Amino acid sequence: MRDAGKAALAALGVYRRRLHRLPYPGVAVLAYHGVCADHGPGARMQGGALHVSVSRLEEQCRALARHCTPITGREFLAIARGEAAAPSRAVLVTFDDGYASMLTHALPVLARHGVPAVVFVCPDPIERQVRFWFDAVAERRGDAAIRALKEASHEEWRRAVSADEMSADRADPHRPLTVTELRELAAHPLVEVGGHTLTHPILARAPEEVQAREIAGSAAAIREWLGADPALFAYPNGRPGIDFTDATIALVAAHYGDAFAVGDAFTEPSAERYRQRRFLMLDTVSAAELAHRLAVSWPRLPEPS
Ligand SMILES: [Zn+2]
């Protein structure tokens, strides 16, 4: 179905009525990354559609608040542990990596719509104020080099990313949060901070002692900075069996209460512990498209006629 058709169905309330009748197949966990300005120097970002514009996030949050029940990370964990039932049409919003744009661009939108979020951060680039490795590599050598490094051995990846390291100044739209900004973000009642490793390696390529350091180190830095243990973790890149393994899960389980992968499907929180699936969110998803996905394509229901 074309965009105009979806917009017409959304305007007629077709998606809304469907959603309210729907037996929701689990929790829809959404995976965002950065948020960028609509205009000006930060409007065109490396990583393209992974950075959702402020106006796009605004319409997506409006649709989520209207059609679904946004829950917190803490509520998700209680559902996963069998201590609480999922509300109908439960949605959990997550953001990966820890861009400064979480505070400057995303938080005002989340607050306007009352949508809670879990922000998974990498403490090393935050502490040292350098770009996330993929944003530095994209700038120096292009997107194909990122894809190649995700498949490279851990040693080769480590060598390449330290050679390509870029410091991030205050004007850089790709800069990570500072520690002070992370504290400010975490102090907001709608925000919870989770771990995402120290430096964002592909864990499955790394020796177990390196994985252990990356996972434990992320929890320790967050505890030191925010004064509380993080409860949730997201695997870098996140493909089960490819980017993380059962050995990784055992290491994560020693420090975190649950963990998120990718997988573009509803997750069944109590059945998918430490491999919770998430839908990737992009700037190309309009409010009507999001309503269509929530009511039709994600639950794999026939198109409305
Ligand atoms: Zn990430």
Image (spheres, rainbow, N blue to C red):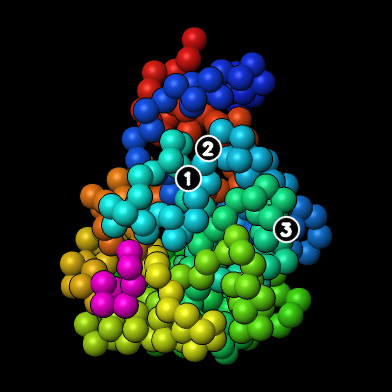
Q: Earlier in the sequence, mark 3 or mark 1?
A: 1
Which three-letter amino acid code belongs to the residue tagged 2? Cys
Q: Residues within 10 Å of mark 3 (few under 14, many from 20)?
A: some
Considering the numbered disc 3 on the image, is that residue within a helix, a strand or a loop?
A: helix
Q: Which mark is residue 108?
A: 3
Image height check: is 4 above or below 114?
above
Q: Earlier in the sequence, mark 2 or mark 1?
A: 2
Q: Earlier in the sequence, mark 3 or mark 2?
A: 2
**Cβ atoms under marks 2 and 1 closer than 8 Å:** yes
The residue carrying mark 2 is 68
Residue 161 drawn at (x, y percent):
46, 82
Instruction: Decide whether residue 256 is among the magenta residues.
Output: yes
Considering the numbered disc 1 on the image, is that residue within a helix, a strand or a loop?
A: strand
Residue 16 drawn at (x, y percent):
56, 24
Residue at image coords 64%, 50%: 114
- Relative to residue 142, is residue 7 drawn left or right? right
Report the front residue among 56 and 26. 26
Give me the C-alpha separation between circle 3 and circle 2. Answer: 20 Å
> Which of the 4 quarters of the picture holds residue 107?
bottom right
Residue at image coords 72%, 51%: 112
Instruction: Decide whether residue 63 is among the magenta residues.
Output: no
Give me the C-alpha separation between circle 2 and circle 1. Answer: 6 Å
Image height check: is 92 above or below 23?
below
**Segment tinted magenta in the rendering:** 252-258
